[in-house]
Amino acid sequence: MQVVILAGGKGRRVFPLSVDKPKPMFKVIGKPLIQHVIENLKEAGLSEFVVVIGHNGEQIRDFLKNGAWLDVNIQYAFQEKELGMADALKSAEDLVEDYFFVVNADDIYESRLLESMEKAFKESGTEAVLAYKPVEETWKYGIVDVKDGRVVRLIEKPPRGEEPTNFAVIGAYILAKKILDYYKRLPVSDHQYEDAIQAFIEDGNPVRGVFYDGFFATYKYPWDLFTLTEYLMDRKITCPSYGEDVLISERACLEGNVWLGDGTRVFEGACIRGPCYVGRNCVVGNNSLIWNYSSIGDNCVIGYSSEIKHSIIGDYCWFHSNYIGDSIISDNCSFGAGTVTANFRFDESTIKLNIDGEIVDSGRMKLGVIMADNCKTGINSCIIPGVRVGPHSIIGPNVTLDQDLEPNTIIFVDKKSYIKKENTITVTTEVKEKLREKLLKYK
């Protein structure tokens, strides 16, 4: 069966990571998300794709090409304006067959979901198939009411207490081409896609529901990348794996499931505790530590005494004596010595961000910086938890950044705030000698 992959959105909620690149092109464990999605679809026996592109879509087309290198066939449709899922489907109208899958380019689930949906479609003679799973926060999702396997109602984000069930629709559908006529009848809105499916149901078209209890996650907010990375790493890095021309010092420590790409060097005193992914041609310097589901791209330098903990790092990034915790850092970023990404609030509460004028709770007690491409920090700078840094921006030396930084911005400390006066403090060796003598007593 043919698959329509929706990849045309601007990704406003994942700002700043989508300013210069489409959401599905963000890489985790060495591959863009859209490649992980296509490989997942292939596992389910699917190979004919229509990819709907929009914002910076040429990057997707230039990467995937016609799909031959992935042993699939890919055609492209272009969504001129970001008008939602319904409009994206309409842009592919001339390319789709009578029945087709619809999936998002940055949703990850088990391939068995697609297999069970196709089986239900073939066996039930239905006009559409939706997948659903139970959720707690029903007001955040499209909710379905299912009777004897048939979907009788679909409501987009019902008010609390008014939901008919706790079954949320998963972003995978089998649809009939004739449903496009329903989209054309409805005004453009954030819920046009769901409203059209409901109208389709109300007209008596049979719609099948398939229950799914496996893994499902979507890249809706930046921190969703952590969940996706952990799942993909557990699934694809199941044993230690070292590429060609890898050099590991005898005095380095590698534990657990660690992936090292071709040409990577690991120097004395370095420690990598899996599961972790380190890409090609990287340098892992002396006394550095990489651990806790960290994914590091190609051509990176993890310099002396740096710690990378539970973070996702792009290509061509450089670190030196840094702490990078629970952070997402895109390509070509450089961190001055002593830069720290704070990831834990003093009040130990979850970290909240202002996204499109709305305060959104990440639900995470630990969240570091979210940094886009081509950024740089000066020595001894500090970035407060949950701060976002736009592409092509610089954080100067000694800056404590406690608010988001717009793209193409430089921020420095105002030197007028320094106080300069005569020194009245005498530096002697007496205290140092006393402390040194105490240390010499330890065996």
Image (tube, rainbow, N blue to C red):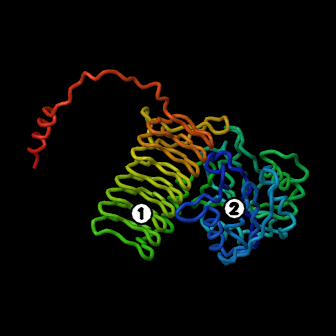
The crowd level at tag 2 (other Cα within 10 Å; few <14, some 14-19, many 20+) is some
- Location of residue 309 in the rendering, given as x and y in whole percent from the top left corner: 42, 52
Q: Nearer the viewer, residue 86 or 173?
A: 86
* Residue topped by disc 1: 283
Q: CA distance from mark 1 to mark 2?
A: 28 Å
* Residue plotted at (63% across, 66% down): 35
**In the rendered image, the vertical position of residue 62 relative to residue 379, given as above or below:** below
390 lies left or right of 260: right
The crowd level at tag 1 (other Cα within 10 Å; few <14, some 14-19, many 20+) is many
Q: Quadrant of residue 254?
A: bottom left
Q: Judging from the image, what secondary structure is the residue with disc 1 in?
A: strand
* Residue topped by disc 2: 59
Q: Pick out the residue farthest to the front.
A: 422
Residue 339 seen in this snapshot: yes
Number of labels in the image equals 2
* Residue plotted at (38% across, 52% down): 306
* Residue plotted at (56% across, 39% down): 410
- Location of residue 240 in the rendering, given as x and y in whole percent from the top left corner: 40, 71
